[in-house]
Image (cartoon, rainbow, N blue to C red):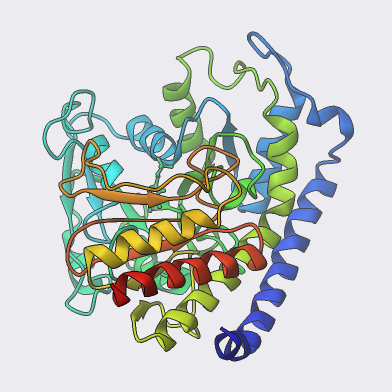
Amino acid sequence: MQEASTSCLPIFQEIAELVENNQLKILRAFQQHRITDFHLNGSTGYGYGDEGRDKLEKVYATVFKAEKALVRAQIVSGTHALALGLMGNLQRGEELLSATGRPYDTLLKVIGIHGEDGSLRQMGINYREIPLTKEKEINLEQLGTSISPQTKIVIFQRSKGYEWRPSFSIEKLAQAIKIIKDNFPEIICMVDNCYGEFVENQEPLEVGADLIAGSLIKNPGGGLALTGGYLAGKENLINKAALRLTAPGIDLEVGSSLNFNRPAYQGLFMAPLIVGEALKGAVLAAKFFQLLGFSVLPQFDEQRTDIIQAIRLGSRELMLSFCHGLQKACPLDAYVKPEPALLPGYTDEVIMAGGTFIQGSSIELSADGPIRPPYNIYLQGGLSLAHIKTGIMLAAEEMNKTKSV
Ligand SMILES: *Cc1c(COP(=O)(O)O)cnc(C)c1O
């Protein structure tokens, strides 16, 4: 561990600079919109005139360089945010094209790969995807020629999800978006920004994307937001998504924030720091498990665009013991032993470790993965480097016991 920590010091320095840039960006947005104590309070019932809620959306819009943002407690998850963006902006006969291969598992049901009730496919919206190249990059050549007259939205996924592939940096997204915009300026470029917020100095809207969406129990909630999701982008696209969230005629005027505002503001303010800690933990885990002889993705010193660290453990037993060890390091439910389970929508059993203050929060220390060869575990989050360090040490210790049995 000592050797791993020492190797990581130059990378930690780079992360410190990233945190400073993003912290300043958020601080300025708070000041520009003159946020005051009053905005931290919430509303009940219809939530008419909830200035705290409305100002939070303005702050998000400024931070992500958007015309408008939708940030609500009523958006139940990242998947819901993405679905609002898609369903609000696609009509019967139009087509959604995925430029980054197969999307994240939960999105497949929104698309309706198997004709799910209420899915895009059932609404008469077509779906196609461009597989990644052999090198697991975006197929830029094919992207240029894949747009059909029906194509309305091209969606990109920044983070790798449960895939053993590099995540797509802002630079790579910029390249791909430019190819579309140069030839088809009217096509909507949407980015699934989950796990990507504040990992780079720029966000997707700054390089030509029209719409982004994500979850507040990941990066932008800073570990404090109690629930929620966000969308940010062009005003007309956000308005259409809002009609889906509420109802025509109601738009964004309603939606009580209850006790959502205060932790959502403070969480956004803390997000650069917390993302920095999660990044340092991911870098350390990469070096530590690489020194133990495991394949890792990305390498500790590779450029990052999300907080996910994949580690190829090579057996079911090691996946289980990794999770058992990590669970022992959690502040809540440390006495629980995670078990693999078949979850709806997945073809293989999935194991998850994490004892978090916010249920299911993956900006807090957690690990998961489908139990299938080559047995990759995906580690993410952690509110402090010290905690993540403890987590990976206990995971390794538990794995060691398994090996010696
Ligand atoms: C987490 C995530 C989502 C959304 O997941 P929720 O659990 O619904 O918040 C979508 N795409 C990617 C790449 C993700 O990591």
Q: Between 256 and 68, which is closer to the camera in this rendering?
A: 256
Residue 343 location, quadrant: top left
In the picture, measured across the screen, residue 176 lies left or right of residue 46, that is left
Q: Between 129 and 287, which is closer to the camera in this rendering?
A: 287
Residue found at x 46% / y 52%: 194
Q: Residue 107, image x and y in percent?
A: 29, 43
Q: Between 175 and 270, which is closer to the camera in this rendering?
A: 270
In the picture, measured across the screen, residue 311 lies left or right of residue 3, that is left
> Which of the image's four quarters has the C terminus?
bottom left
Q: Residue 66, image x and y in percent?
A: 59, 48
In the picture, measured across the screen, residue 112 lies left or right of residue 40, that is left
Q: Residue 67, image x and y in percent?
A: 60, 44
Q: Residue furthest left?
A: 114
Residue found at x 33% / y 68%: 179
Does residue 391 appear anywhere in the picture? yes
Residue found at x 66% / y 67%: 386
Q: Is residue 323 above or below residue 292?
A: above
Does residue 54 appear anywhere in the picture? no
Q: Is residue 196 above or below residue 170?
A: above
Q: Between 177 and 314, which is closer to the camera in this rendering?
A: 314
Q: Residue furthest top?
A: 45
Q: Is residue 142 above or below residue 224?
A: below
Residue found at x 70% / y 25%: 259
The number of numbered discs placed on residues in the rendered structure image is: 0
